[in-house]
Image (cartoon, rainbow, N blue to C red):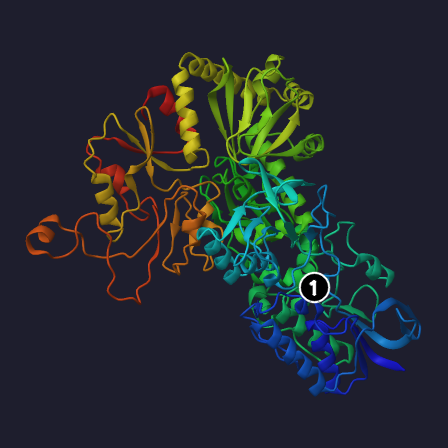
Amino acid sequence: MRYQIAIVGGGPAGIAAACRAARAGDTHVLLEAQPHLANTIYRYQKGKHVMAEPSVLPLRADAGFEAGKREAILDRWDMDVVAAGVNLRRQAEVKGICKDESGFTLTLVNGEVLLAEAVILSIGVQGNPRKLGAPGEDLPQVQYQLDDPDEYRGEVIVVVGAGDAAIENAIALSANNTVHIVNRKGEFSRAKDGNNSAILAAIDQGKVIVHYNAGIERLELQADGPPVKLLLNADAGHETVPCHRIIARLGATAPRDFVEGCGVQFPSKDAAALPQVSASYESNVPGLYIIGALAGYPLIKQAMNQGFETVEFIRGRPVTPVDEPLLRKKFEVFSAIKDVEVVLDVLRQRSSILAALNRLQLREFLLESELRAPELGTRLYQKGDYGNTVFLTIAGEASVELNSADLDANPVIKAGRMFGELALVSGRPRSASVVAGKGCIIVEVPRRTMLRFMASHAPIREYVDRVFALRAVQNYLAPGVGEAEVLKLLDLCEMKAFKAGQAIYEHGTEAGHIHLVRSGSVTLAAARGDREQVSAYVPAGQYFGEVDVLAGTARRQTARAAIKTETLAIPAEAFLQLLEKHPAVQVRVRDRFQLAVQQRIEMERNPERGEMMSFLLKEGLGEATDALLIDESLCVRCDQCEKACAATHGQVSRLDREAGATFDHLHVPTSCRHCEHPHCMKDCPPDAIHRAANGEVFIESTCIGCGNCERNCPYGVIQMGVESTEAPSLWRWMMFGQGRAPGSELKVKNKDIAKKAVKCDMCRGRDEGPACVQACPTGAALRVGPEQFFEILRDGRR
């Protein structure tokens, strides 16, 4: 029989397509390889709660779906398929699809042949799970699926992954087992908000043990104890976890061989690449449509909407995508273009980043971003500001303000280029101001959106890294050197990553490179007996290693990553050739060379300063942009700093003067460091934590009190509290028993008033600056950034 539509794959997208075809009277067949529908969801753990996201997206389908338990959803779809009269073929696995002049021929594994005018591929990607990518990944104790967590009791189980499936498996298994979860990143950014909150709560309660920024080195069998030994490479160094089994939930890759065998082309050889589709979900093969996870949209509601829309497209029935009104509103900046699809085409043509996304991913990217057409001369950001967004120039140009006396000499950012990535990648302030030029139209991309797409799209990550390296070399190392020459230099360079404490190079080794710090920070230390004496600190955006290269000697110091760090390694020979060709750059570098030698000599003469620097870095000042220090030689313990803080912030103090560590006369109280890459900003469901232009990290009133930031902060500087206008009074409390005692916690009578996260915000909006510093009667309190370390250590004070 010849069908108008053959639907391959009975997942949510296929079910929605088949139900629509059946309701509309289109001849069709739904081919499902398994004996049941929705195999991916069928294989979810029993009782799993399935979410219906994105919540703002309405459902457009002839099959129902709402958040609920796995079993209820599967039952609902079985009933919907029957009620719609879908022509369903179970255990009908398709082996191949070919197209000729008459249409498509589908060959099943059992040898049966079917004919169709159009084909919808909705096979998903779950049949090809990503493996661990380490020796031992094929041991029998490694599995890539969890059907029923209640089957396992009393075991040590390691779940690898940071997505929804990994989180749900880890939480379910923790009821009867000891569970570790391995996250290759520093946050659970890919998870839905509910899962994110749940895993952080489980970690906080000790139900799940987390390993952040951890990569798997290998798996080994062992004779004693649990059968497997898992070796990790994490921020803190090497870790070993003996366990009974490893459950890897790392997502999946497209069934590429099968899809390419159908004639579908992929944009690159990257294993994570997905086929490009048109606005109507049609592939490069006319009449063959791809929807759901295979098209880059794994969310159930999105997939079902696509199933409905694709059938309408095939049968020539007009339909408007559900996100069309939202995109049309954003695209109003293009006054001459009214058609959404035309605008999408234009955007992909004008930006390498946008061109790396398929149609559906591009729509999602733009829905989360803002399109702006600022007037000529509008300042887009200020030099020295901290930024939470990056920019793509779509039309016109923007101008970098380097020379106010000669505006024509300022660099121009033309259409198709990115800017603002230095602050995003390094966590450092903006290196220059940028203003809108003639005809400027920009896409302003939120930090979280760009980081998420960088993590999941290799071409975007590579592009951003390339642009960052170009700008970093031009700004910090070789200003005035042309772009073409810098790009040739970058072809010789390599981006390298280091764990906290890992040596970038060691004393006595050959000086083969200089290093530009992409993110993180570095310490330089000289050998002193059997230990290292820290002599210098290098923050993100600065470079190091040039002293030995210029001197032509072996390394005289050891360079170590103070925190997780990435550097751009520039070959020494290429660096020296650059200096020889550009005298102005040579003068700049040699001046810095003299200063570095002088600082090294001073630190070596005063070893206690190196000890103090090591202490400050250990206390987190290596990633701080503004930290509170107290000079104990001047402090009289009056607690005026704490009182002033509480009075400024609704009677909830944001610092604890007595807590914290002390070295010699310097004390680091418990107070926010305003980190370069704030840990508290990770996994904030309402996105309530932001960084102001001056670097202060603050929490807005939209905080829902989930406590994620409190758990994520490694320095214990965030607390959950309730602000009040009533200040504690010692006399009123002692004489009349009224109010609360100074230092006591505010008790909330109304249980509907929830506690919210509070932390130091550097007294944001206070003209006089931080109250703690202003209130100190002896000048013992001071706020510093990492660049001031050497000055503090040299002078013993400010």
Q: Where is mark 1, residue-wise?
A: 293
Observer-nearest of 715 and 568:
715
Residue ID at (36%, 44%): 717
Residue ID at (53%, 33%): 500
Residue 205 pos. (x, y %)? 44, 53
Quick check: 634 above or below 386?
Answer: above
Query: What residue type is disc 1 on?
Result: Ala
Observer-nearest of 523 and 239:
239
Residue 337 in sight in this render: yes
Q: Residue 218 falls in which quadrant of the image?
A: top right
Q: Residue 762 falls in which quadrant of the image?
A: top left
Count how many numbered circles sit on residues in the image: 1
Quadrant for the N terminus, please: bottom right
Residue 338 in sight in this render: no
Observer-nearest of 180 and 384:
180
Quadrant for the C terminus, please: top left
Q: Is residue 688 left or right of residue 156?
A: left
Q: Secondary structure at mark 1?
A: helix
- Crowding near the residue tagged with mark 1, few <14, some 14–19, many ≥20 C-alpha atoms within 10 Å: many
Residue reaching furthest left? 735
Q: Is residue 561 left or right of residue 787?
A: right
Q: Residue 670 falls in which quadrant of the image?
A: top left
Residue 443 pos. (x, y %)? 57, 55
Q: Is residue 339 left or right of residue 9?
A: left
Q: Is residue 753 left or right of residue 167?
A: left
Quick check: 5 above or below 185?
Answer: below
Residue 6 pos. (x, y %)? 82, 76
Residue ID at (45%, 17%): 599
Residue 302 pos. (x, y %)? 64, 69
